[in-house]
Image (tube, helix red, strand yellow):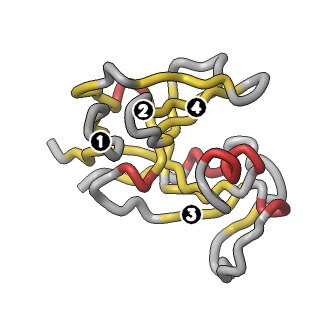
Amino acid sequence: MKKIKGSCLCKKITFEIKNECRYSVFCHCQMCQASNAEFSSYTKVKKENLNFKSKKTLKWFVSSKHYKRGFCSICGSSLFFQKKSSDDYISISTGTLNKNIPSIGHIFYKYKKSKINFSKLKKFPQSAQGYFDKFIYRIK
């Protein structure tokens, strides 16, 4: 079975994604800007396709009324993003992965700060309301 491996910077949190994940989406929201950079790139997986090898240092921060963010308490790597009301899916920062996940679009584009030209990808001014969830990347 093909897998994609991921970890935090210090390797205290390690995990694997099997089977499939959503194509990556760039998020330009103010929370991603404050916790990562001018924008973040996330894929989304069913929790049944995520296998933690080590997660002793994984901590969660409730970043808003509806969402929480997972990070390493040792190195500070921002790894995960999840709805508080859902245990079925988890979003994973693509920078933590050992393989490229193709990008499909942008959310919260109205908050874009970067001067990088993103002309070819679909853009939503705010949330895409699940629009990108139908774009599934089969792990090879």
Residue linked to disc 2: 72
Secondary element under disc 4, as helix, strand or loop, is: strand
Foreground label between 3 and 2:
2
> Could you give the CA–CA distance between mark 3 and mark 2, rounded to whole angstroms?
27 Å
Q: Position of residue 73 (x, y in %)?
A: 43, 28
> Could you give the CA–CA distance between mark 4 and mark 1, rounded to whole angstroms?
18 Å
Foreground label between 2 and 4:
2
Image marks 2 and 1: residues in contact by CB distance under 8 Å:
yes
Q: Position of residue 62 (x, y in %)?
A: 66, 23
Q: Of the residues shown, which amino acid type is indicated by label 3?
A: Ile
Residue linked to disc 3: 104
Quarter-of-image position of residue 108: bottom right
Q: Of the residues shown, which amino acid type is indicated by label 1?
A: Cys
Question: Residue at image x 51%, y 56%?
Answer: 24
Image marks 4 and 1: residues in contact by CB distance under 8 Å:
no
Residue linked to disc 4: 69
Secondary element under disc 2, as helix, strand or loop, is: strand
Foreground label between 1 and 3:
1
Question: Residue at image x 66%, y 54%?
Answer: 27
Q: Of the residues shown, which amino acid type is indicated by label 2?
A: Cys
> Could you give the CA–CA distance between mark 2 and mark 1, rounded to whole angstroms?
9 Å
Dot 2: few (<14), some (14–19), or many (≥20) neighbours within 10 Å?
many
> Could you give the CA–CA distance between mark 2 and mark 4, rounded to whole angstroms?
10 Å
Q: Is residue 53 left or right of residue 59?
A: left
Residue linked to disc 1: 10
Image marks 4 and 3: residues in contact by CB distance under 8 Å:
no
Image marks 1 and 3: residues in contact by CB distance under 8 Å:
no
